[in-house]
């Protein structure tokens, strides 16, 4: 019995020794894994230690990076990489954001995310060699077509009626720019006129981020219903066209300054407010505050710039072989706009003032056709960018689909169409 007992004791001891050995092995493995854990945790938990910097006025990319503890060599590499691979050369105050990611609060930055827009972000990651790699990510958009309509009430402006209809201010500004080719918002707006807009809303992860393009607009103007549709041609360019596929964007705008009040119309006989006698008023006056930017009514080239006793500071632009425009009483010229300068439609050429024969700040605007002054508010303006036959066929199909969508949304105002 004793031998058996001793044997059992020996057997038990052996098992204990083996168990201890296994336990020690597991402990050793645990310690090794624990010792290596920070390497994997840098990857797994790197997104948990982050800070976001919103760019403010006066901020520079180098200054922001320096405050995050990056060395001058790293900063220079990051700046060069962003410029070469992402086209980022500077920062915009109150718009751009930069996100810094660390493994821990006290660890160095190992990832930088530059967010120049809600739909694009640029990721910079630091590899084992200390070099920064760049990757640009486009954020997928969930774009929806939304329809809003309204009516002008007595005493309304288009802006007030549009806001009441729930149209965002930015979309209203785009509609102003489109309709300004066909109408004058000061003189052509009357109670009872109806209008509608089909425009894009962009969503990401179920939340609205911003508004997109105006897809279609309709307005019951005095000269008849004005309709415009946004259409992409086969070559990828986009434009706005009327119901028949003719270019809706004219070569010149009737009212260069949106929503400016007309204080004096075109006339062959007008009593001059300064001189006191009757003579022709060869343009239209728009009231605006001193310093208001004056945009070019169309693309062209500056042919005159200077001062005279009547017009004060003025700019004259030639647009084609037939049309020229003149802008007078400027407080000052836009820097870089000189005789011979090519300007784009909407480009600022000067600022409203009251120089020359003027009783107060305003823009005097003239259109000259074939050497003769014409009324900017009534002259027939040439369209540009008309569709060829192939594109027009596609446009008419597309316009029909848009009209069907507009009809559906007009009957279901709380719905939208996924584009």
Image: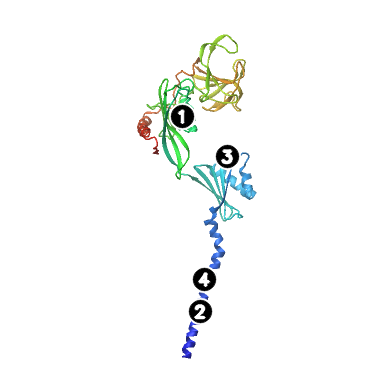
Q: Earlier in the sequence, mark 1 or mark 4?
A: 4
Q: Label 3 to label 4, Cα distance in Å? A: 55 Å
Q: Residues within 10 Å of mark 3 (few under 14, many from 20)?
A: few
Q: Earlier in the sequence, mark 3 or mark 4?
A: 4
Residue visible at 54% across and 58% down in the picture: 41
Q: Earlier in the sequence, mark 2 or mark 1?
A: 2
Check disc 2 and report the residue beneath it.
Answer: 16
Q: Residues within 10 Å of mark 4 (few under 14, many from 20)?
A: few
Looking at the rendered image, the disc whose residue lies closer to the viewer, 2 or 1, is 1
Q: Label 2 to label 3, Cα distance in Å? A: 69 Å
Disc 4 is placed on an element classified as helix
Q: Label 2 to label 4, Cα distance in Å? A: 15 Å
127 left or right, relative to 231: right
Disc 1 is placed on an element classified as helix
Q: Position of residue 25 (x, y in %)?
A: 52, 72
Q: Earlier in the sequence, mark 1 or mark 3?
A: 3
Q: Looking at the image, do the residues carrying marks 1 and 3 touch, with CB atoms under 8 Å apart?
A: no
Check disc 3 and report the residue beneath it.
Answer: 94
43 left or right, relative to 391: right
Check disc 1 and report the residue beneath it.
Answer: 162
Q: Label 1 to label 3, Cα distance in Å? A: 28 Å
Vertical arrangement, residue 385 with respect to residue 206, above or below:
above
Q: Earlier in the sequence, mark 2 or mark 4?
A: 2
Check disc 4 and report the residue beneath it.
Answer: 26
Q: Looking at the image, do the residues carrying marks 2 and 4 touch, with CB atoms under 8 Å apart?
A: no
290 left or right, relative to 184: right
Looking at the rendered image, the disc whose residue lies closer to the viewer, 1 or 3, is 1
Disc 3 is placed on an element classified as loop
Disc 2 is placed on an element classified as helix
Question: Would residue 218 be seen by someone viewing this image from the given angle?
Answer: no
Question: Would residue 102 be seen by someone viewing this image from the given angle?
Answer: yes
The residue nearer to you, when weighing 356 against 146, is 146
């Amino acid at each position: 019995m004793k031998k058996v007992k001793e044997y059992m004791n020996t057997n038990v001891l052996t098992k204990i020794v083996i168990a201890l050995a296994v336990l020690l092995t597991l402990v050793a493995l645990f310690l090794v894994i624990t010792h290596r854990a920070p390497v994997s945790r840098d990857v797994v938990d790197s997104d948990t230690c982050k800070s976001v910097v919103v760019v403010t006025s006066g901020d520079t990319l180098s200054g922001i990076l320096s405050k995050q503890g990056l060395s001058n060599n790293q900063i220079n590499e990051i700046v060069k990489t962003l410029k070469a691979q992402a086209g980022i050369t500077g920062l915009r105050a109150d718009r751009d954001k930069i996100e810094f990611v660390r493994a821990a609060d006290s660890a160095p930055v190992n990832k930088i995310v530059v967010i120049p827009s809600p739909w694009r972000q640029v990721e910079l990651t630091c590899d084992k060699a200390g070099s920064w790699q760049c990757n640009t990510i486009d954020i997928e958009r969930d774009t929806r077509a939304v329809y809003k309509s309204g009516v002008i009430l007595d005493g309304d402006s288009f802006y007030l009626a549009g806001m009441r209809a729930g149209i965002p201010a930015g979309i209203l500004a785009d509609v102003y720019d489109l309709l300004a080719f066909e109408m004058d918002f000061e003189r052509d707006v009357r109670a009872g006129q109806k209008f509608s807009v089909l425009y894009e809303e962009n969503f990401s992860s179920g939340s609205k981020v911003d508004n997109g393009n105006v897809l279609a607009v309709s307005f019951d103007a005095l000269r008849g219903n004005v309709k415009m549709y946004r259409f992409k041609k086969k070559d990828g360019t986009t434009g706005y066209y009327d119901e028949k596929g003719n270019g809706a964007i004219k070569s010149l705008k009737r009212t260069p300054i949106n929503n400016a009040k007309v204080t004096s119309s075109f006339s062959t006989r007008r009593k001059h407010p300064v001189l006191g006698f009757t003579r022709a008023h060869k343009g239209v006056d728009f009231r605006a505050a001193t310093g208001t930017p004056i945009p070019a009514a169309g693309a062209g080239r500056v042919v005159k710039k200077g001062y005279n006793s009547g017009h004060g500071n003025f700019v004259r632009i030639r647009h084609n072989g037939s049309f020229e425009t003149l802008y007078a009483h400027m407080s000052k010229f836009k820097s870089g706009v000189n005789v011979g300068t090519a300007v784009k439609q909407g480009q600022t050429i000067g600022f409203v003032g009251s120089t020359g024969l003027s009783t107060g700040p305003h823009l005097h605007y003239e259109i000259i056709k074939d050497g003769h002054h014409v009324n900017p508010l009534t002259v027939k303006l040439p369209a540009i960018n008309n569709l060829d036959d192939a594109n027009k066929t596609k446009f008419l199909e597309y316009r029909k689909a848009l009209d069907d969508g507009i009809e559906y949304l007009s009957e279901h105002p709380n719905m939208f169409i996924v584009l």
